[in-house]
Image (tube, helix red, strand yellow):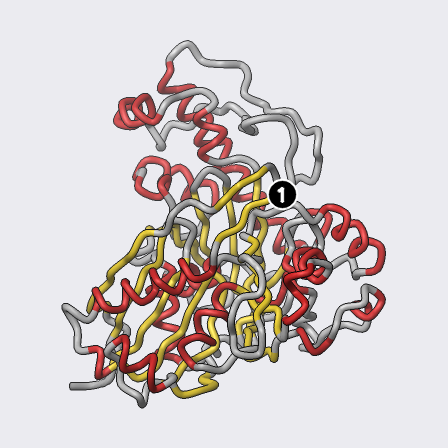
């Protein structure tokens, strides 16, 4: 039997493991739940050992349906910005500060004073702010490396730590353009010895630890590859592969990502780029989206009204739906009010006008990326809950002027498996 490739996604609610064959066909997927992180105000953390235990459970469950002995490579993705500190043996010295942990406000202010405007390290929830916070804690005294969630799981599999990838380190201050740790980190007193060695996502860096392989039922010949973030893994899962290919996530918020040939940065609009080999994944997020719809209709209301939508007959209303005042992208205005008037008498017309408004925001977002230097939009692949609404898909196709489809696969674990298969994106 030909070799298999394993992707592991460490998410907020659980860990998923996915196996693909040499053609990228999904052969199996299993999951194991995680308990909610501990939360105390802006402090949100979790015991990293929970991630490892769930990873082991998911892999063993997958072994019930596939032959784990045929796995050749493994790649891991994790939540972007989740960070912990470990000792030389890989043992956690601190809890894992989760991606949305925002306790490091004072540290974020220090970063803002010295970091370049385009750095992904800005903000209290950045990995760098977390590193500065943890470095001052007594328990960090034995720390040898600062690693991300995906780094630590991959390192545990390999028995080799201090390795990361060009996507996870973006929020730690890494410069993906020059592929270096910038000099301004020294002004913050960051120890260079704590920073991980950075590889291109998908690059194999070690054989699996023999004891771990035996425990999990994997072959001792398995190679462990550098991983990526959950968002990038989800993009890879859609198989978008040509500059101008884009992925729109229709969730609580509207998130757009476009495959580009050069990096796009506009920090004041929340636009940044992940490096994918010699290509770039440029993206931004609007405050509009499903949350703006829920301000007016319940999920049941929207399901009831959808059959009454008439995409071929636009309402002509120029809406800008927002759940509350303030927008990041494609209009950077923290006080921007929602525009949802006048309201038609019929609920289905109002619902359609809201969907048209969000489609207009999506189209404007891709135009903004083009103005910043992104390639011409070629096609859009939809993911998220809103992607299931066929009428909305047609409304969006009319607004975007390019083919719009729904992704066949959206699971980050599938994207991580494809990354393991490819050995790194081109």
* Residue 185 seen by the camera: yes
Q: Is residue 413 above or below residue 13?
A: below
Depth check, front residue: 248 or 371: 248
* Residue nearest the observer in this picture, 148 or 348: 148
Residue 373 visible here: no
Label 1, on which residue?
Answer: 330
Q: Looking at the image, which is closer to me, 221 or 335? A: 221
The answer to whether 110 appears left or right of 328 in the picture is right
Residue at the image position 47 percent from the left and 47 percent from the top? 37
- On screen, residue 217 versus residue 395, left or right, reads left
Residue at the spot 43% in from the left edge and 60% down from the top edge: 235
Q: How many marks?
A: 1
**SS at badge 1:** loop
Q: Is residue 188 left or right of residue 399?
A: right
Residue farthest along the top direction in this orientation: 345
Where is residue 375 drawn, in percent x and y?
57, 62
At x 74%, y 73%, the residue is 191
Q: Is residue 54 above or below residue 7?
A: above
What is the quadrant of residue 202 in the picture? Answer: bottom left
364 to the left or right of 217: right
Who is closer to the viewer here, 241 or 124?
A: 124
Q: Is residue 208 above or below residue 146?
A: below
Q: Position of residue 265 (x, y in %)?
A: 68, 59
């Amino acid at each position: 039997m030909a070799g298999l490739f394993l992707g592991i996604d460490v998410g907020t609610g659980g860990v998923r493991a996915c196996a693909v064959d040499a053609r990228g066909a999904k052969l199996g997927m299993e999951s194991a739940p995680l308990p909610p992180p501990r939360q105390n105000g802006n402090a949100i953390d979790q015991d990293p050992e929970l991630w490892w235990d769930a990873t082991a459970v998911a892999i063993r469950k997958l072994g019930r349906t596939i032959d784990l002995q045929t796995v050749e490579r493994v790649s891991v993705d994790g939540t972007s910005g989740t960070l912990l500190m470990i000792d030389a043996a890989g043992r956690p010295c601190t809890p894992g500060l989760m991606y949305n942990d925002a306790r490091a406000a004072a540290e974020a202010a220090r970063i803002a004073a010295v970091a370049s405007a385009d750095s992904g390290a800005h903000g209290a929830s950045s990995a760098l702010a977390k590193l500065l916070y943890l470095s001052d804690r007594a328990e960090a005294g034995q720390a040898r490396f600062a690693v991300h969630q995906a780094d630590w799981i991959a390192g545990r599999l390999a028995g080799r730590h201090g390795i990361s990838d060009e996507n996870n380190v973006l929020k730690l201050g890494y410069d993906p353009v020059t592929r270096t740790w910038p000099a301004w980190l020294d002004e913050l007193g960051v120890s260079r010895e704590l920073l991980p060695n950075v590889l291109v996502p998908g690059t194999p860096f070690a054989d699996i630890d023999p004891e771990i392989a035996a425990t999990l039922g994997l072959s001792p010949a398995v190679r462990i590859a550098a991983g990526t973030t959950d968002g990038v893994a989800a993009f890879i899962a859609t198989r978008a592969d040509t500059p101008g290919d884009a992925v729109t996530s229709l969730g609580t918020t509207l998130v757009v990502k476009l495959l580009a040939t050069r990096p796009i940065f506009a920090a004041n609009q929340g636009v940044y780029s992940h490096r994918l080999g010699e290509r770039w994944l440029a993206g931004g997020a609007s405050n509009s989206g499903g949350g703006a719809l829920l301000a007016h209709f319940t999920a049941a209301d929207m399901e009831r009204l959808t059959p009454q939508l008439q995409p071929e007959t636009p309402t002509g209303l120029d809406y800008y739906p927002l759940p509350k005042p303030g927008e990041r992208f494609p209009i950077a205005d923290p006080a921007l009010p929602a525009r949802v008037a006048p309201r038609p008498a019929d609920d289905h017309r109002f619902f359609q006008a809201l969907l048209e408004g969000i489609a207009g925001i999506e189209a404007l977002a891709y135009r903004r990326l083009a103005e910043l230097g992104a390639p011409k939009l070629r096609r859009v692949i939809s993911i998220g809950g809103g992607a299931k609404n066929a009428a909305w898909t047609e409304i969006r196709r009319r607004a975007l002027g390019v083919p719009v489809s729904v992704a066949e696969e959206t699971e980050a674990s599938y994207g991580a498996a494809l990354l393991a298969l490819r050995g790194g994106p081109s």
